[in-house]
Structures are given as C-alpha cells and as structure tokens.
Amino acid sequence: MKTDNLRFLSCLLATSMMFAVSCNGGTGTTETSATDSDSDSDSDGDDDDDDDNNTTTTNTTNSTTEGPGDGDGDGDGDETTGPPPPVCGDEVVEGDEVCDDGNDDDTDDCTILCMPPACDDGIVSGAETDIDCGGPECEAKCDADQGCFQNEDCASLNCDPDNNVCFAAACDDGILNGTEEQVDCGGDTCDPCPDPAVVINEIDYDQPGGDTGEFVEIFNGTPDDLDLMGLFLVMINGSNNTVYGAVDLSNAGPTLVAGGYLVVGVPAITGGVPDDVLTIDQANNFLQNGSPDAVALVDVVNMEVIDNVAYEGPMGDVMFMGIDIVFTEAQPIDNDDGSLQRIPNGFDNDQPGDWLFINPPTPGLENIAP
C-alpha cells in the first residue's frame, strides 16, 4: 500500500513539472516555431536526435518601394515636371527659339538652330561663304581652302574662281597679303622690299562723261632731289604700240625734291593741288583710254626707263628714242569716279597688284588705302 502511494506521488510530481515547462516555454506567439530539445527526431542529420538548444526562426518580410524609372542612366529618375522640350524644325516657335521655318536652308532668315543667321553660330549661314567667314555681313575673312565667291571673302584676298576656295597668301601672287609689308615683299616669308624710288604714282585717264579730270602724278620717294632734265612722260597707244605724246618734265622746274610730287594734268586738276606741288598743264583728253594704253617715265640722258604702267590690258614692247619700254600692267580699270593709285604710296614692285582703283583721286597728295 505504501509502495503504491509513493508511485502515485511520483507520477503526480512528474506531471506537475511537465506542465511548468510548458508554461515557461511561452504561449500565444505567432510565426514562431519551437523544437523541444527532448524530441527524438533528427531533422538536421547530425545523429544527435536534435538535442541541441531550442532553435527559433523568425520570418521577416522586407518591402521596397521603387521610385520612377531611370531610362537614360543619369540618376535623375527621368521625372517629367513640365512640357516636352521644343523641337527645332516643327514650324512652331517655342521655348528659346527665335524662329522656326521647318526647313534646313541656312541661307534664309532662319537657320537649323531656329535662330537668325549670325557670324558666330558655328555653321555656314546667311551669305557666308564658309563657317562664320566671308560674304558681305561677316567681318572675318576665310582662310586657305575655305569657301569663297570673290577675293574679298579671303584673308589672302585671293579666291580660286574655278574651285571657289581661298588660296593661301604667297610672295608671287601680286597682292598685298599675309604678313607682307608691300606687295610680295617684306614680312615673315617674302624677300625684303626695295627702297622707295621715283615712280608714276597715280593715274586718272577716264571719267564718266567728258574726260575733264585727267592727270598723271609722279612721286620722288628717294631721299635725294631728282634732276628733271632729260626726263619725259611718254604716252603710248596700245592699239598699234606707238607713242602719241611726250611731256618734258623739266618744264615744271629743275628738280623734284625728295618726297615731292609733280602732277601733269588738265587745269581743273593742277589748279587744285597744294602749293608745293610741281605742275604741268595739259588739254582735256590728253590721255587715251583705249584697251590697252600706257604711260612711261623715261630718262633720255641715261637711256633708261624709270617706271611705266599699262592699263586696261597687257602691252607689247615699245621703242622711244632708242629706249626699249617693257610694260607692267595695272590690274584695276579706271572707268568711274576715282583713280589708279599705288598702294602703299610710292612703292614699286613691278607687280599688277601695286595698283588699286580708289575714290576719290588724290593728285599731289599721299595715296592711302581705303
């Protein structure tokens, strides 16, 4: 009997202890599973009947809210907060556009930039002959191998008419360009310029209507006075290469001072020159204006040609008092108000480019480039 009572108390005590363990394990939890260390299962395959410490696993769910897309990869989310950007070429002036004519013609009033043509827009626009150069509107001249329509489009003042591109400046192109000091001389690449000389410096052989303003100007560019004895201004008819007139320059005085001018011309011209300028009057129309004609400055004492120029075309050689005159042609043609002038004043490189047609004429005065 006593033995049975002890056995009952032992079972009762064991039952109470199991209930206490269940209470201490906690109840009412969610998403939590507990595995008793006394379990006989071996779910982890370690042959220990899984009698390790209780393992608790908690499931956690993370949620991520994605922002707007970033299709261009610039990190800004590609968010659009306003109207779409303007489209140049849709014939609608919008945004920063000044114009929009819907075409790709940059020679009209509206370019492909939807702006008026400008000399700094980085394209060939308006009347430009190349990018931001040439034409009547841009101050910048085009460099070698850039487009051109006329000499004035080029920095070298020399446009290739066959290919419409600018030539580079050269020491034999008959043009004052590049770094030259005078036509085809001086500067960084050309030979030194000749010393100033006695030259035919300016001619006005033709005027609109009646030729009442004709003259030839002679300039002594040397540092010494010039003896005029034996010096003649000779005029040649280019149609038959004959002399049609000669003016004895000693009629103006015995000498032409250094830096001085002598003007042979009609009274309307010689009457208006400065007082220190030597003059010799001639009748109206004393200069022929055929195509071509010429004048020469000849020293019959020393049997030499000091200077000469043919105008309105090339001339053949002409003999005057046993002196062979070989002519240099002036490029411009004098058929309007103005005159043929040596530019720079007084310098002779025996080049057609020594001459420019300039208005107004400057008889008895220094020639100045426009």
Image: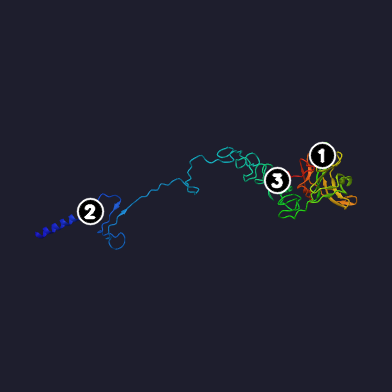
Q: Amino acid at mark 2?
A: Asn
Q: Based on the displayed image, in which of its 4 quarters is residue 272 positioned?
A: top right
Q: Nearer the viewer, mark 1 or mark 3?
A: 1
Q: Nearer the viewer, mark 2 or mark 1?
A: 1
Residue 269 badge: 1
Q: How is the image coloured?
A: rainbow
**Closer to us: 168 or 74:** 168
Tell how many labels: 3
Residue 234 in sight in this render: no
Q: What secondary structure is found at the residue carrying circle 3?
A: helix
User: How far across and how far down the image is residue 7, in percent?
Assistant: 13, 59
- Mark 2 to mark 1: distance in Å? 134 Å
Indicate the position of residue 41 as horizontal and vertical percent values.
Answer: 28, 59
Q: Amino acid at mark 1?
A: Ile
Label 3: few (<14), some (14–19) or many (≥20) C-alpha neighbours in 10 Å: many
Q: Which residue is the site of mark 3?
A: 153
Task: Compare marks 3 and 2 and give the one earlier in the sequence.
Answer: 2
Q: Earlier in the sequence, mark 1 or mark 3?
A: 3
Q: Secondary structure at mark 2?
A: helix
Residue occupying the point 13% across, 57% down? 9
The numbered mark, 2 or 1, whose residue comes first in the sequence reads 2
Residue carrying label 2 = 24
Question: What kind of element bears circle 1?
Answer: helix
Of residues 296 and 240, the one nearer the viewer is: 296
Q: CA distance from mark 3 to mark 2?
A: 103 Å
Q: Amino acid at mark 3?
A: Asp
